[in-house]
Structure formats: structure tokens, C-alpha cells
Amino acid sequence: MELTPRPQDWAALYKLMIGSILPRPIGWISSVDAQGTPNLAPYSFFNAVCANPPTVLFCPMIRGMAGNHKDTLRNVRETGEFVVNIVSAPLAEAMNATAADFPPEVDEFEAVGLAKAPSVVVRPPRVAASLIHYECKVSQIVTVGEAAGGGSVVLGEVVHLHVDDKVLIGTDKIDLAVLQPIGRLAGSAYTHVTVESLFEMRRPSA
């Protein structure tokens, strides 16, 4: 198959993209609106950008035909803050529950029964059961498209980092077996990242 994107239906292209760009890490983003109401939602268009300054990104996409922006995007525009909560396997069901399309006034933490933990630098709370949290200040929001299927790139500088001691090896390595991260695939599918599934390749010298 050969495909030129522009004349095509965006929904078909979306399916091809999420079926081939994988596995994708999950950014479980907590934010608050201007009145302080918490919001919590997962994003699989999420990744690291660089370490100096430490920066991450997530991409809220416009899915509905009405072209409505997600609550998270509105919140980070209003407050300039968010937290990335890393999703471990025991939190998968709770993470998925927060993907429901709740009204803006609903606190997803309360709706799905998740305990909050206060952040140190930013206003949005953290998922208490998550083992790693990145507290972030928005450094840039790039609008890529305003119609259905469009979206934005939210760049956030990490201003505080929480790492549960039990996932640490030394002071700067993460124990994969303890963290038990999961990844997003297409449709309703997810994948476990386990020690047994790893393989190593040394980077060659020039």
C-alpha cells in the first residue's frame, strides 16, 4: 500500500500510526484548572525530550468531531503546570478508568478511587500509588491542528522528581523488575515490559 496523507480520512491514518508506532510509553497526566479542580488522564503520545533542561512532552489530540479540546490541555494553558505519573502494571486498571470522558468538573482521582499525594513545587496532585512522578512547568505549547484529528505538543520542564526508593538501583538506575512499566499498543491492547523480554545490543564505536 502507498498512501498520501492529505486526501485521506484522518481516522484511518490514526489507526495506521497507533498500530505501527509502538509500544508507546504512557504519560498519566495530572493537572488542575484555574479553580483548583484536579484532572487525571493518560496519554500515549508521550515521551522525554532532553535532560538539560530536563524536559518531557505529551500530545493531547482532538478526537471528537466537535473539535473540543481535552480538559488537560485547557488546564495546562490556564495554570502552566502538570505532573507525569508513571504507570506500573498494578495501576493499569485505574489508569484505564481515568481515560473515560468525564465532565470537566469531575475529579478523576475521586471518580476512580485513587489517593492523591501533594506535589512539592506545582499545584496538581500526584497519584500516591505511582512509583515515579515528574512535576513539570509548561515551557511551550505548540498547536499543530485545531480540527478533529489535530492536536498540540505540550513541553514541560521537570522542576521536581519523585522516585520511590524501592525502584532505585544505586542513585541513578531504575529496577525494571520492581517498576513493572506497561506500554500502549493499538486498540485496547497494552504490553508488559519485563526483564525476561529484554535483549541487549552494545552501541558500536565509529
Image (cartoon, helix red, strand yellow):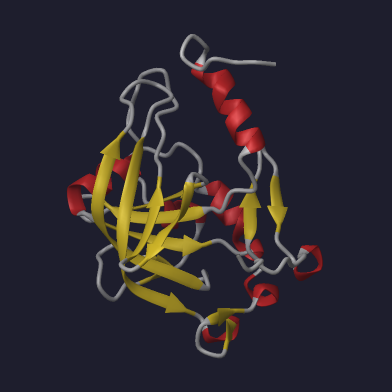
> Is residue 105 at least partly visible in the picture?
no
Toward the right, the furthest residue is 196
Point out residue 40 in the picture as x, y percentages from the top left corner.
Answer: 41, 52
Picture residue at 42% right of the left edge, 51% below the top:
108
Question: Which one is nearer the viewer's eye here, 116 or 121?
Answer: 121
Residue 193 occupies quadrant = bottom right
Residue 22 in the image: x percent, y percent? 64, 44
Q: Nearer the viewer, residue 9 or 127?
A: 9
Quadrant of the drawing holding the C terminus: bottom right
Q: How many marks?
A: 0
Q: Classify the position of the N terminus by image quarter.
A: top right
Residue 1 vertical placement versus 113 (above, below): above
Give me the residue at 39% from left, 39% from top: 60
Residue positioned 23% across, 55% down in the render: 139
Most distant residue in the top direction: 7
Residue lying at 60% horizontally and 15% vertically, measured from the top left: 3
Residue positioned most to the front: 206
Q: Position of residue 180 (x, y in %)?
A: 66, 68
Above/below status of 69 relative to 88:
above
